[in-house]
Image (cartoon, rainbow, N blue to C red):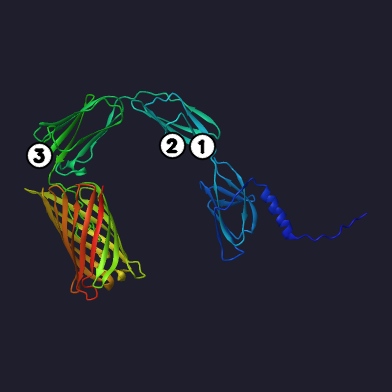
Amino acid sequence: MVFQLPAVTVNLDDVLDIIDLVTYFSGTNPLAPTEQTKLDSDEDTIVHIKSVPRDAEIYINGVYKGKTEVTLKNLRPGKYRLELKKQYYECDVYNFTVKAGYEQTFEVNMKELQGTFWFRNIPSDASVLVDGNRVTSKNLAIIAGDHIINIIRFGFNPIVENYFLQPYADIYVEPDFVESPFELTDFQVSRDFLNPEIKGALGKVEVTFSVTNKGTARLSVFAPDGSLTNRYQFGEFNTWNQSYTWNGYSDDGKMLDDGLYWIELDCEGSKYETCVTINRTLNYPVMNFSTNGFSYSNVPSIEPFSIKYGTIAVSGSPVFSNEGYAATGIEVAAGGCFSEALSGGAVFKSYITDNSGFPFSISGNFRYNKSFAAENGRFCTGAFLRYGYAFDAEYMPVSDYGAGLGFGTLAGWNNRQWSLTGSAQYVLGSKTGNILEKENSVILGLSTVFKPVKIVSIYADGMFTIGKTAVVGGGINWLPFGAGVMINAGAQTVLGFDSMFGTTEIKAGLTFVF
């Protein structure tokens, strides 16, 4: 016998709604959007799935969708089941609702699967580091997985162990310390010269060394004629790193004469030696730094010695034309000395104007210099190379030295009280202000530095596009405390163009020396 059931019409949307409900209620944690923005279309949907930490596997309704962060477009509005999976993190299940006409962001903070390290019999003078982070408690709950434990104690060999920590497991760490033999390493001075007349880093040297166990040492400083000028007795060592600072004065408070001084360290039956030169003609080599890449002004500066240093200079410069205020310049420069003869840096400058353009220039530089001893000072000479690029130069309210290839030479004289530097630079394809001339230019400069106590430099410079324009300027840089922060001020004005004649830029800023 055959029975025939009556025909039944099934609405597909009703079936999908039932599936949505089953999917929705199979989850355990409702997840609300952290961000929600209305779209132009009422039918489109955009969903962003994020997690902390990133790179968690995403499963939506059991289907893999990639790793966080993921963007899903045009999901059908409704309710969904979300799973996030990442090794050593709890795998939670969430429910979220996609709304038609909205861009939504859902973010999950995942929970770590942790275990615990327990530290036993750790002396108070020992330090415990887990993955490079110091631990001060007797136990540490941390994410499961591979970890490196380093235990250090002065006078004993360091202990380094690799551990794999299972989720919810306990590992007990109980070190066995082995005493280390005495050893002295890394005996050195911070620099091989100093000028005791100058306060700050250039007026002192630091003698440093490292030891592995208890002991003592005596440091002595000897003048060029072999006489003893300084003696320092270290107490018993109770840590690894030791240091002594010498400022070029003897133990009785007298400033020592120029010359080569020997530093000798007697330590546990061994001797270590190095030497330092006192030279009171020395001065900080960075007085200026500029848009053409060599000075804060436009004058390259030169000094007769090697010192590793870095600078960051920031300045603002209002610009005034014949009609009043015209624009504001912003300049950032960075540079440094890398070896006895090599230095360089980079400069960025932009102007805030009423025009729609964004004028700026950027340049890099490289300098080589050499000095030669003379009877009462030092003669210095050098060569430099720079290259710059300018964008929207037609909106530059004053001359821009940042464009084109430049090369030149400089020479100077330096003694204990002052220095004088002259420079000449030839720029190929320079762009000058809003005239946008692609003409070759010559830049001449003169800079002098006064340095009895506080370092002050005064500079004057000029840029000349032959037969067409000239820009002249000058200023002052002041290092009031002998080190650290330099105060800068200067101005330049344009000559030779009717449309730009008299346009003046006034600059003020700070340079940080480190």
Residue 79 on image: x %, y %: 65, 54
Q: Nearer the viewer, residue 393 or 25?
A: 25
- Tell me which residue sits at (22%, 54%) in the image: 487
| Disc 3 target residue | 257
When asked about the image quadrant of residue 127, the answer is top left
Q: Is residue 126 visible?
A: yes
| Disc 2 target residue | 131
Secondary structure at numbered mark 1: strand
Relative to 375, residue 158 above or below: above
Q: Is residue 430 visible?
A: no
Q: Nearer the viewer, residue 158 or 18?
A: 18
Q: Which mark is residue 145?
A: 1
Secondary structure at numbered mark 3: loop
- Name the amino acid, label 3: Asp
- Name the amino acid, label 1: Gly
Q: Nearer the viewer, mark 1 or mark 3?
A: 3
Relative to 181, residue 147 above or below: below
- Name the amino acid, label 2: Asp
Report the Cα–Cα distance between label 2 and label 1.
12 Å
Residue situated furthest front in the rendering: 324
Residue situated furthest left in the rendering: 375
Residue 184 on image: x %, y %: 27, 29
- Mark 2 neighbour density, 10 Å: few (under 14) some (14–19) many (20 or more): few
